[in-house]
Amino acid sequence: MEKKSISFLLFFIMASVVAMTYGQSISGTVTDPSGLPLIGVNVLVKGTFNGTQTDFDGKYSIEARTSDVLVFSFIGQKTVERNVENNTTINVQMEEDAAQLEEIVVIGYGSQKKSDLTGSVASVNGEDIARLPVSSLDKALQGRAAGAYISSPSGTPGAGMSIQIRGSTSLSASSEPLYVIDGVPMISEDLSGLFSGGQKTNSIADINPNDIKAIEILKDASATAIYGSRGANGVIIITTKRGQTGAPKINFNSYYGFQTITNQIDMLSSKEQLELMDEAARQDNRDLGTNYPDNYVSDLWGYDPNDPDLQNTDWYDAIFRTAAIQNQDFSISGGTDKIKYYTSLAYFEQEGTQLGTGFERLSARANLDSEINTWLKIGTTISVSRTNQQRTINDNSLYGVVINTLAGDPLMPVREEDGSYADPFNYFGWWMLDNPVLVAEEYKRTTKTVRGLGTIFAEISLTDALSFRHSTSIDYTSLVDESYTPIISRESVNSGANGLGTYGSTEDFTWITENYFSYNKNFGDKHNLDAIVGISYQASNRNFASISAQQFPSDQFVKLATAAEITAASTAGTEWGLASYYFRANYGYDNKYLLTFSGRADGSSRFGQNNRFGIFPSGSVAWRISQEDFLKESETISDLKLRVSYGVTGNQDGIGNFASRGLYGIGNYRSGATLVPSQLSNRNLSWERTTQYNFGMDLGLFNNRLTLTTDYFIKDTDDLLSSRLIPGISGFPSVLDNIGAVTNKGFELSISGDVLRGDFNWNSSFNISFIRNEVKNLVVDDQIISDSHILKEGYPIGTFFLIDQKGVDPQTGNIIWDDFNGDGIINADDRQIVGSVQPDFFGGFNNAFSYKGLDLSFLFQFSVGNEIFNHSRAIYEGLGWSRIGTGFPLPDGNNHVLARDRWQEPGDITDIPRASLEDGNWKEYSSRWLEDGSFVRLKTVNLGYNFPDQILSKLNLSNLRVYVQGQNLLTFTKYTGFDPEVSQNARDPRIAGSDFGTLPQSKSYTLGINIGL
């Protein structure tokens, strides 16, 4: 049905074009103010779809009637209208439009000239996003905006990103920004109920990146306060493409390519692993007085390390693959002075580099703008998408594919001679809990999503200065999860389940209506007032159901109807509402002194009864020094502006829809159903409150050929959502409350410049951010959150708490542990603060070159100072440590090639201890596994060629571009794991930075073509 509707719309538009016929041919030449021909000027018969564009020589030809009016439009030039009358030749000289040339920035509920901004906003061009081979727009933002730390915590296709704007602001709520698409806040949370080891789905991946015109990232409170209780983590505003006056423009973009993993971890061969195990026994004889015979382990296992036919399985080769990626995107846009349209249809498919993973999206969009008369405009924005994501168990799961691949026993084959999967329990490794190829190929984790986003709006001009806008929007998602754990899997065998299946469905419907007045008026020559005031209402309803079963007849019958036993079934629903009032007033005096006040009052059903409404005000001022008389004529300084802002915003994402209420659950008493209290109420529960100060400067030199933006901010968050312990007499261990505080302080720098102009152009930009995060107040200090993390006042969120390794004794080869509590015993009581997940600084460096039709661009992304707990290595790398309780040595897994540098005899200087069958040198939660996560990554490279107009005119094309591009081509890092970008990977920010079997990102190479008609 969706495909038929889209096809009908495209057919209708094309049929309207073909249906136009005119009586005479009009031709002419269009030039710029200096008399040079202008290429690509839109020439349109006013009020129709009949139009054309000027060619390489600025010439055009069009059919028109004598009563018609021709409209000439071009970016940066004033629109010109000419009556046809009896003319057959109409030449036009365009005039520069200074207002159009000024950069416009989209902000909350409106737009502003960049020169008039008093807040902190970063902009990203949609063209930079559309060129990249990525499944979602958030992946394309990495390294492009100061203050935005964006990492890709999992290489699973379609997986969610981690985005923090100006630091971590919460302990238990989300630190993710609010997404607003075409003026409508969108649901961006993970709706999937599947357990896949910490991998998130990504609702932002429902949007076709090629539909995006621009993205603005609102960072300070002056920019985000108008979003009130949802603005504390910043706001990402997405503007999609819309139609422009002119003849229909048809564009087709296609690329194909392949991907590989970005990095491969080198492990010991089976020969080296056997030799290490035998050495471990000899070392224990010398150090511990044991009496193991020579070649103890290899003889016991029945292998000869020197056997040329010794099994040596490459588990990476079995699990990872060269994967395909493709994208097909078609759009048509155009319009008259009355009706403008943009429609698109796109298909994206990405195979995962790991077996069993992939992502697929089919999407369509239709944006329509219609001017009914001089005082009324109406329009629609509609998008529909269908995605299909295949995942496997991975991050943070004992049965994960990656962790079992890393720990994989090289002496074990992938399959037995009869073709069945080899069972690790028939071999000699402890950790490989299941054959990773079996898990990748036979386990099923599928999430299918259908999503519709729609808006209808009307704008009424009440006077020249006053207008009113109404919009109604919906955001609908229908999601289906299916999972299956096969009968032959170790997990199923151990539990006796004989196959485990789950089916889940989630339906989310959000309805939003906005009504606001806009006022914009100049008073005399020096005063300007631009203001809005409005109300908003949002209602969300979510229903979900889940059913689980076991005892399947075979792995070929995986639907739940074939299972013999239903083990669980549940249904639930939830809803919440948000009523808001908001305003913003911008005042400018003489284009020098700028003042902005904005605010929002949010009433949320999530808040406690005593805190139902929150008020979020902000104010900012700016001084355009470059407009003062003493700088106005400067040939060096073209723009200089100082900005100061203050404001309060909130975060309500950590509050469940009924978190403030007393709840009851279902219980059993004497085989009967009962209601029992399940949650204590808190009528005072409210949003997390963030107060932010910002001091900024914008500088433009040499007619803005070089621009520089700096910001220093202080971001204090109070009333953090956290569980507070209460007396047991209440019947509850804790209650959710607003307690605690955290602060982020930082400095941002962005520099951009046109280094060279002419036939050879070179544009370069650089951004860097320094952010310091600190927990200021906790209801209980020194909270040990996990075996590896702690929350402590005076330290950042994501602080590592581990036993500290001081070195390796050169005489014995044993690790020198720091006995932190001085009791002579090394155990968990000796853990101490040893590092943090927070980087010292991060940023990006982008360059774009062009020479005539040839263009080259590349982007480097970097992060320095963050640390990663390599939990994967802690698990598999035991250096011989074996589970020998049964008298049979079973090592945790294979070892990293760094084990070649281990201590072997007195006098060796190394940080790798001796091999041992005992566990004295192995501590899972120690600083031995804490590594520097700093990296510099060549994120993107794009090389393209735009064919010249002489060729385009012969082919009847408006543009033709071929290109090759690469993604994640080079990574410079000391980290020994797969990928250093796991530094922010966690649903819980308190335990971020652990790498436990995380799938790395992909390195991609694509070849594409862009055709315009």
Image (tube, rainbow, N blue to C red):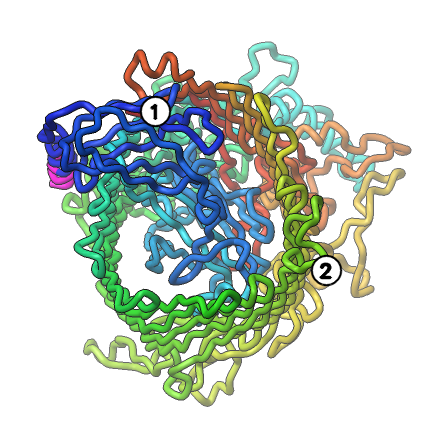
The residue lying at 39 percent from left, 73 percent from top is 582
> What is the span of residues highlighted in magenta in the rendered image?
1-8
- The mark nearer the N terminus, 2 or 1, is 1
Above or below, comparing residue 722 to residue 14 in the picture: below
> Can the viewer see residue 748 in this picture?
no
Q: Position of residue 638 (x, y in %)?
A: 65, 48
Q: Position of residue 795 (x, y in %)?
A: 69, 65
User: Label 1: which residue?
Assistant: 29
Which quadrant is home to the N terminus? top left
What kind of residue is marked 2? Answer: Ile
The stretch drawn in magenta includes residue 3: yes
User: Label 2: which residue?
Assistant: 833
The residue lying at 25 percent from left, 61 percent from top is 459
Left or right, 119 with reference to 424: right
What kind of residue is marked 1? Answer: Thr
* CA distance separating discs 2 and 1: 73 Å
Q: Nearer the viewer, mark 2 or mark 1?
A: 1
